[in-house]
Image (cartoon, rainbow, N blue to C red):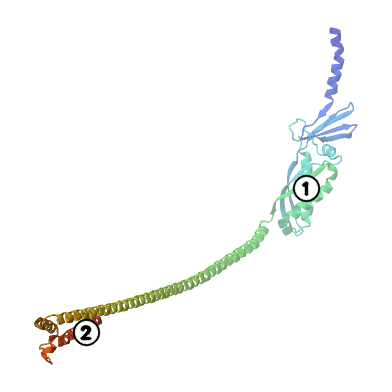
Amino acid sequence: ELPSVFALVPYIVVAFVWLSRWEAARPDEWLLLLRDGQLVSQGIGLRAFRGWRDIATKFPAAMQKVRFQTTQVDRDMQGLDVSGYVSWSVNRDGEGPWNAYKYLAMRDKDGDGNVDSDAGAQHVAEMAKAVLRNHIANTSMRDVLTQREALRDKVREVMMQQIKGWGVWVEAVEIADVRICSNSLFQDLQAEYRHRIRRTAEEARLETERGIKESALAHEVRMAKAQAEAETEKRLAAAQQRLRAEREEAELFAAQAEAARARLKMEEEIELARIAKEAQVRQARAMADAAVAKIEKEAEAERLKVLYDAEREMPAATVKRMVMEATVQACEKLPLREVKLNVFGGEAAGAGSWLPGPAGLMHTWEVLNSMKDSAQG
């Protein structure tokens, strides 16, 4: 068994050596695989097999940032102090990583993710200062102070051309501060600026006051207009209210007049009905009175006839007595103070010859009284 274990040792050693030849970079590292001083393979986070003749090296892929400051006179011979920073990274194209490793000392021997030396960053900063000084020397101070975006774009463009073989990609150039070296010149420039700012502020204040006054006047106009409209609406509402009241009063008066006409018409109809009823009553009463009078007359005639018949059959003395009594009764009913009876003819005529006279007179008086009562009713 022991010899068989020793037989496996060469295989184990070969496997260990083979595995140890594999090189792997972290996701934030460049891996360069070189053979005889020539680049074989490169990449960030790359895993590659290192042959017997190959050399593998790693360096950080993080973006670098370096500050710079320079002093330069412009084309008008006015001194300017300019500071800023350059953000750069390794150029991915072609042999950019290999050139950056060669020329900018991009080494990380301790493996902390940072470049051990800042020599490469200083080279980039010096190049930025050189390009910036050259641009300031051909530019006016006003353009440098006011057109920083154009200044930084120009510096970046020139730097990309100058360091093309360094394996560097300039991400951004920022101008942080620009100062005038001459204090008196700075004060003079500031004086002009202050005067302009003061004038602008005064104009803004006057414009604000004018706007406030215009707003106040416009507000007063709106208020006066609103008040006038309110007064007009108030008067219009009052007039409409009066018109409605007058219309309602007229309608009420018309209704009252209509009710009065209806009442008068009803009273007239009632009065006409009453008069017609009274006429009917009078007519019925007259007819009844006439009928009663006729009946009484007929009864009286019948009574007289009976009396006459009885008289003819009675003795003469009895008839005379009855005639006298009837005559006395008839005369008592008449409105007469004195009554004289004259009898003509002989005794043979008898008392019955003058009895119809008082009796007829009595009947005539009763008829007159009945007509008088009907007229009063």
Q: Nearer the viewer, residue 80 or 315?
A: 315
Residue 203 image-quadrant placement: bottom right
Q: Which residue is drawn at 46% across and 73% down?
A: 240
Q: Where is residue 291 in the image (x, y as percent from the top left)?
A: 27, 78
> Which of disc 2 and disc 1 is earlier in sequence?
1
**Residue 46 appears in the rendering:** yes
Find out whether the residues at labels 1 and 2 contact each other: C-beta distance under 8 Å.
no
The residue beneath circle 2 is: 368
Q: Which mark is residue 91?
A: none
Q: Quadrant of residue 347?
A: bottom left
The quarter holding residue 32 reads: top right
Q: Is residue 136 above or below residue 288?
A: above
Q: Which residue lies furthest to the top in this view?
A: 1
The residue where tag 1 is placed is 128
Q: In this view, does 4 lie above or below 229?
A: above
Tell me the amino acid under the disc marked 1.
Ala
